[in-house]
Amino acid sequence: MSAEDLESALRQIGAERYHVLHPFHRLLHGGKLNRAQVQAWALNRYYYQARIPAKDATLLARLPTAELRRAWRSRLHDHDGDAPDTGGIARWLKLTDGLGLDRAYVISTDGLLPATRFAVDAYVAFVHDRSVLEAIASSLTEMFSPGIIAERIAGMLAHYDFVTPETLAYFTPRLTQAPRDVDFALGYVKQHARSVAEQEAVLAALRFKCDVLWAQLDALYAAYVAPGMIPPGAFVPDPASSQ
C-alpha cells in the first residue's frame, strides 16, 4: 500500500473496532449508568492510565536515536508530570476522588477486575516484546481519542450530577496532547512500514490495541451491568451508590 492507503486502512480499523462503539461506553456517555457503575469504570481505567508510563518507558529504552527518544519522552511527562500531583495520572485520581472512591484503594489496584489487569499487562508486554514499529503502531488508537473525549465530557456533564468539570480535568489536556502524539507516531509508521509484512504487522498491532480496550469494557459490562457477576476480590459498590 501507499502511505496514504496505509493510513486509510488504519483509520478503518478504528471505525470498526474502537471502543467508543462498545455498549458500556454508549451507556456511560448517555447517562444510563448509576454512580456505582461509573465508579467501577474509573477504578478499573486507573490501572490502564497508571501503566501507560511504564509502557512508554519500555519503548523509550529501545528507541535507537536521541531524536526519537526526545519525541517519545513527552508522553512520560504528560502522564507522570514533573512534580507531585501533576500529570495525567494525578488528574485521573481527581476523578476517582470526585466519584467518592478512596484514593489509597484505587492506587492499590486491589479492586481490579481480573480481565482489566490481564488486558493492560498484555499491552505493556506487547510493547516490550514486539518490534519498535509495532509498538509505535499500537499507540495509534489515539487517532480516534479526541472524538471520544469530547463526547465523554459533554455526555457526563450533561447527565451526571455527581460529575463536575474539575473531576473531568484529565480529559481536556488530552484534546491537544493526543493529536500531537498521533502526528509523530503516524508519521513514523507511514515512513517505516514499507513492505507487505511490515504493513500487515502495523495493522495487526492496532487491532490488538483495540482489542485491549474492548476487553476491558467487556469485563466491566459483565460485572457491573449484565449479568452482574462481580469476580471474587473485585470492587463491590456500596448499595447506596447503585440507586
Image: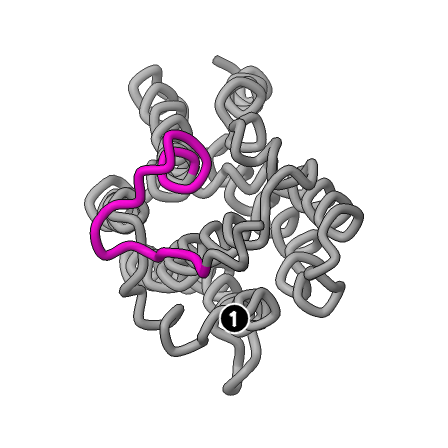
Among all residues in the image, which is located at the extreme bottom? 84
Q: Which residue is mark 1?
A: 93
**Is residue 210 at least partly visible in the picture?**
no
Label 1, residues with CA under 10 Å away: few <14, some 14-19, many ≥20: many
- Going by the image, does 59 lie left or right of 93? left
Q: Is residue 44 above or below residue 190?
A: below
Residue 41 position, x and y percent, is 48, 50
Q: Main secondary structure of the magenta part?
A: loop
Picture mark count: 1
Amino acid carrying label 1: it is Leu
**Quadrant of res 146:** top right
**Quadrant of res 111:** bottom left
Check residue 53 for magenta coloring: no
Q: Which residues are magenta?
A: 221-238
Q: Nearer the viewer, residue 106 or 228?
A: 228
Residue 240 position, x and y percent, is 53, 59
- Going by the image, does 213 lie left or right of 94? left
At a point 37% along the width and 37% down the height, the residue shown is 228
At a point 52% along the width and 28% down the height, the residue shown is 22
Residue 212 position, x and y percent, is 36, 37
Q: Is residue 147 above or below residue 176?
A: above
**Is residue 71 at least partly visible in the picture?**
yes
At a point 37% along the width and 58% down the height, the residue shown is 47
Residue 45 position, x and y percent, is 44, 53
